[in-house]
Amino acid sequence: MPSCVAATETLHETVLRPKKGNRIAKLRMIAKFLFLQVSCSQTDDNLLLHLKQKIACHLTIRSMTGAVCDVGHIKTAVRVELLRLAKCYFKTRRLPNFPFRYAASRRPATLRAMRTADFDFFLPPELIAQQPAPERDQSRLLVLHRGNGTVAHRNFRDLLEWLQAGDVLVMNNSRVIPARLRGVNAHTGGQFEILLLEENAANDWWVMLRPGKRARIGTNIVFRTANGQPGVVQATVIEKNEEGHRRLRFDGTPNIIGDLDELGEVPLPPYIRRACAGEMARDKQRYQTVFAQPPGSVAAPTAGLHFTEPLLNEIRSRGVTICFLTLHVGLATFAPVKTETISAHQMHEERYEVSAETVRIVNEARAAGRRVIAIGTTTMRVLESVAARNQGRLVPGGGRTQIFIHPPYDFKLVDALLTNFHLPRSTLLMLVSAFAAPNDTRGRDVIRSAYAEAIRERYRFFSYGDAMLIL
C-alpha cells in the first residue's frame, strides 16, 4: 500500500476528525487533496516526508522559543500545512513538487515581498549548544567567502590567519546583567518568572513576565533571593502594552539594579536548559565577554564570547587595532519575527554609545582603505545605524537604534563580520543574509547553503555555539 494511503488513514484519525463550525469545508478540501495525492504515483512518499519535515521544524522553533508544544500543536501545524497545499492545488490545478515551501521560495525576490518563511530552516535539536566550549577559543569557525560562496572549516584561534595588519576589529563591550528574576504573587502565592527588558527610570522597568495571564494591573509581586527565600524587594504591575509586556514599579530598594546580584539569575535564552539555578554558576562567567564593561544587556553579544585575553593580545601584536562601542542588547535583538513579510516587522529600540576614540580609529581606517570588521551583529547594527544617519561616517555620541537590516541592504562601513549561527526566522539571520550579498537578495541562498554545510559538519548553533566569519 502506498505510504500516502497510510498517511491518509493516520491523518484521518488524528487530524481530520469531524469538527464543528466552518472548519468542515476546509477539512473536506484537505481530504479531497489527499485523495488526489494518493492517486498520483510520483508523489508516493513525498507528502509524508514533507509533513515530517514540517513537524520537525515546528517542534524545533517552539523549543527554541521556550513555547509549550504538545500533540494538539502538532495536529494544528499539520492541518494548516495541508490546507495551504490544498488551496494551492485547487488554485493552480497542479500537484506540488516537494519540498513545496522551498520550491516556492526560489522565485526571484524582486517579484514578491520577502517572507519570514524564506528564512526558515530545520536544525536537529542536538546541534543547539547547551554548554560553552571547554575554553572560549576552542570553538569551531566556519569561514564564508561572499564572492564565490565557498567555505572553509577551521578552529576559532585560526581567526588570526584571516586578519591583516591595519585591520580594525570593533567589539560590543556591554555587560550582561542578572536580568531574570523569580517572585510570587503576594496574595495567592502563585509563581512568576520575570525578565527585565528596558529601564524607564530608577525602579521602573518594562519586563517579560510568565505566566502573563496572572499578572493583572495592580498585582503585587514579592521577589525571592538566590536561596529561594522571600526578600524585601517587591514590585507592582502598573501597565500592560500591546505586546503583552508588563511595566513594573519596584519598592523596597533605592534601585533594583543594586539588588540584581542577590536576586537575579543569568538571563540564558530559553533553548539553553538548566535544571535549577545552582547549575548556572559557570554561566555567570561564560555568558559574559572578557572585555565587558558598562552593565545593561539582558542577553549576551555572543560573537564576543569566543575571545580570551591572550588571543586579544596576540591579535594586537599582529598590527590589528581593537576598539569598542556599547549596545545594550534588548528585545530588538532576540524578539521573533511574527509578521508574514519581513518588511512589516517593527524593531524595538536599543541604547548605544560610541566613543570619540572608536570614531577616530574607524574613520581613519576607512579613509586609508583598511578593513573594518564587526564582531557581532549588535556591533554591526550600531556602526551601520550611525553611518546611515551621517553620510557613511561614524560620529561620537549615544542614542537609540531600531535599524532593521535585511536583504537587500547597502552597507556603509563594515567590510567583514564575525558572528554566531542564528535562529530560524530571526532578524539576526536576516542581517547576515543581507551582508552575504550587499544590495541583493541572493544572500539568503548563500547563507542557507552555508548553514546546510554547517549542519552537515555538525557545528554547534546559537549563543554557546560555534562562530562564522563572513569575508
Image (cartoon, rainbow, N blue to C red):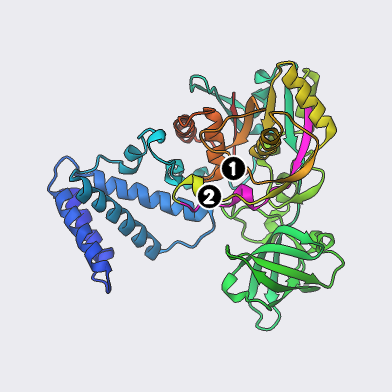
Q: Which residue is mark 2?
A: 345
- Residue 425 in sight here: no
Mark 2 crowd level (few <14, some 14–19, many ≥20, 10 Å Cα)? some
Going by the numbered disc 2, the residue's amino acid type is His
User: In percent of the image, x 82 and y 46: which residue is there?
Assistant: 294
The x, y position of residue 143, in whole percent, is 57, 25
Residue positioned most to the bottom: 187
Helix, strand or loop status at disc 1: loop
Q: Nearer the viewer, residue 31 or 9?
A: 31
- Quadrant, the C terminus: top right
The x, y position of residue 198, in whole percent, is 71, 57
User: In percent of the image, x 69 and y 78: which residue is there?
Assistant: 218
Work out whether mark 2 precedes mark 1 in sequence or the reverse, and give the earlier one: 2
Q: Quadrant of residue 241?
A: bottom right
Position above or below: 182 against 381: below
Q: Which residue is mark 1?
A: 404
The x, y position of residue 308, in whole percent, is 75, 33
Disc ID at residue 39:
none
